Amino acid sequence: MRRTVLPWESVPGPKYSAVDTLKRNNRIKYGGWFVVAVLFLGGMMTRWKIALIFAVLYALAMLMEKYVTVTERGLEIYHQMQITTNYEHWDWKDIYAVTHEPDPAGSGRMILYFTKGDRTKRNYFTNEDTKEILKLAKKQNPEIRIYNGKDTRDKAEAIRNRNKKK
C-alpha cells in the first residue's frame, strides 16, 4: 500500500493529531463486509441493480481513512478514500469558537468542538494536546472564544432543575 502524504507534513510548528476513535472491533468489521456481500449478491441475483451501487459505496466507506490535525494554520481534515481524497482546511481566523469538555466515557481524552459559522466539528485529543491547542488558538486568533463545555452543561442543568421546581 502506498504511503499517504498528508497536506500538513511540510507546515512548520507543532502538529496535534486527533485520537482515532474509529477503532472497529472484529464483529463490526465482519458485519460490515457481510452487508457488502449481501448487497452485492442481492444486486446480482435480483432486478434491483441499485444494490450493486450501494455495495460499492459501503465498501468504500469501510476502507476510508480520516486524518485530523491542528496546526498553526488551523484545523485540517483529510479523508483518504480508494478512488478520491478530500482535504478540508479551517483557518484560525474563520474559527469562531473552540469548546472543550472531558470525554464522558472517562478515557482520559478531551473532546474539542471547533465552530466555524454554523458548522461544528467534534474531535478527540489527549489532555496534554488540548491545553496546547487552546493556547495555540488564542495565539493565532485573539478573537476566538473558548468555552468549557462541562461548565456550560452544569449551568444549563441547574437552570433546568430550578425551572422544574417552580
Image (cartoon, rainbow, N blue to C red):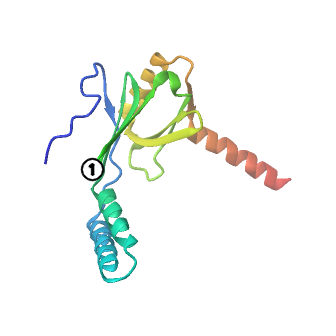
Residue 10, compared with residue 29, is above or below; it is: above
Residue 16, given in percent of the width and then of the height, sits at: 33, 31
Q: Quadrant of the rendered structure where residue 143 is? A: top right
Type of amino acid at the residue the image marks with label 1: Ile
Q: Residue at x 29, y 49 (%)?
A: 81
Q: Residue at x 33, y 73 (%)?
A: 35
Q: Is residue 20 visible?
A: yes
Q: Nearer the viewer, residue 36 or 30?
A: 36
Query: What count of labels does the image hold?
Result: 1
Q: Residue at x 13, y 48 (%)?
A: 1
Q: Is residue 134 left or right of residue 27?
A: right
Name the residue that disc number 1 marks: 83
Residue 64, given in percent of the width and then of the height, sits at: 30, 52
Of helix, strand and loop, which one carries label 1?
Answer: loop
- Looking at the image, the residue that sits furthest to the left is 1
- Looking at the image, the residue that sits furthest to the right is 166
Residue 23, given in percent of the width and then of the height, sits at: 30, 55
Q: Quadrant of the rendered structure where residue 133 is? A: top left
Q: Is residue 123 left or right of residue 96?
A: left
Q: Residue at x 46, y 16 (%)?
A: 139
Q: Nearer the viewer, residue 78 or 22?
A: 78
Residue 55, given in percent of the width and then of the height, sits at: 33, 67
Mark 1 burial class by Cα count in 10 Å: few <14, some 14-19, many 20+? few
Residue 48, compared with residue 124, is above or below; it is: below
